[in-house]
């Protein structure tokens, strides 16, 4: 994905964002050793809020574990990756984040899932545009 094509709306920024995008690419393409390397890069980045970072990383670890297992009962493996489905999940994650005062860990955790949704929406739209 070219730098100009990167999805907007992701919470990860800068070099962390680059590593997260590499991670998502690798997970989707089932290149798990590359995903592990990208996850290590995300872990090495410092966040001013360590609890947020812990939640974000825990979500990425769960995404990787779920992708590796292929267990159809896991959220990652059973969700609808249509544009409508992804938009619904994105709204659900945002609603949770806006509800009350979630702890920093929870904000990080659901931000990672929200970033995955934004990424998948952007890549779905790019592939549709390429097919046109």
Image (tube, rainbow, N blue to C red):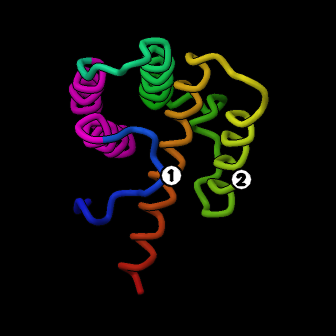
Q: Residue at x 29, y 31 (%)?
A: 35
Residue 76 locus on image (x, y percent): 57, 36
State whether residue 112 is above or below residue 103. below
Q: Residue at x 34, y 58 (%)?
A: 6
Q: Residue at x 42, y 12 (%)?
A: 50
As drawn, is 127 to the left or to the right of 116? left
Q: Which mark is residue 118?
A: 1
On the rendered image, what quadrant is the C terminus found in? bottom left
Magenta run includes residue 109: no
State whether residue 76 is above or below residue 86. above
Quadrant of res 21: top left
- SS class, disc 1: helix
> Disc 2, disc 1: CB below 8 Å?
no
Q: Residue furthest right?
A: 100
Residue 73 or residue 79, whichever sits in front: 79
Quadrant of res 105: top right
As drawn, is 30 to the left or to the right of 71? left
Q: Residue furthest bottom?
A: 132
On the rendered image, what quadrant is the N terminus found in? bottom left
The residue labelled by disc 2 is: 88
Residue at mark 2 to residue at mark 1: CA–CA distance = 11 Å
State whether residue 4 is above or below residue 99. below
The range drawn in magenta is 14-43
Callout 2 environment at 10 Å: few (<14), some (14 to 19), or many (20+)? Answer: some
Magenta run includes residue 30: yes
């Amino acid at each position: 994905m070219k730098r100009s094509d990167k999805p907007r709306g992701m919470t990860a920024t800068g070099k962390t964002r680059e590593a997260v995008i590499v991670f998502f690419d690798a997970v989707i393409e089932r290149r798990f050793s590359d995903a592990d390397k990208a996850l290590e890069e995300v872990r090495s980045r410092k966040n001013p809020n360590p609890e947020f970072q812990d939640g974000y990383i825990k979500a990425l670890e769960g995404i990787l574990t779920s992708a590796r297992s292929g267990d159809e009962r896991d959220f990652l493996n059973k969700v609808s990756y249509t544009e409508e489905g992804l938009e619904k999940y994105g709204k659900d994650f945002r609603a949770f984040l806006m509800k009350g005062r979630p702890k920093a860990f929870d904000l990080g955790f659901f931000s990672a899932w929200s970033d995955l949704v934004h990424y998948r929406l952007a890549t779905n739209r790019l592939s549709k545009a390429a097919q046109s």
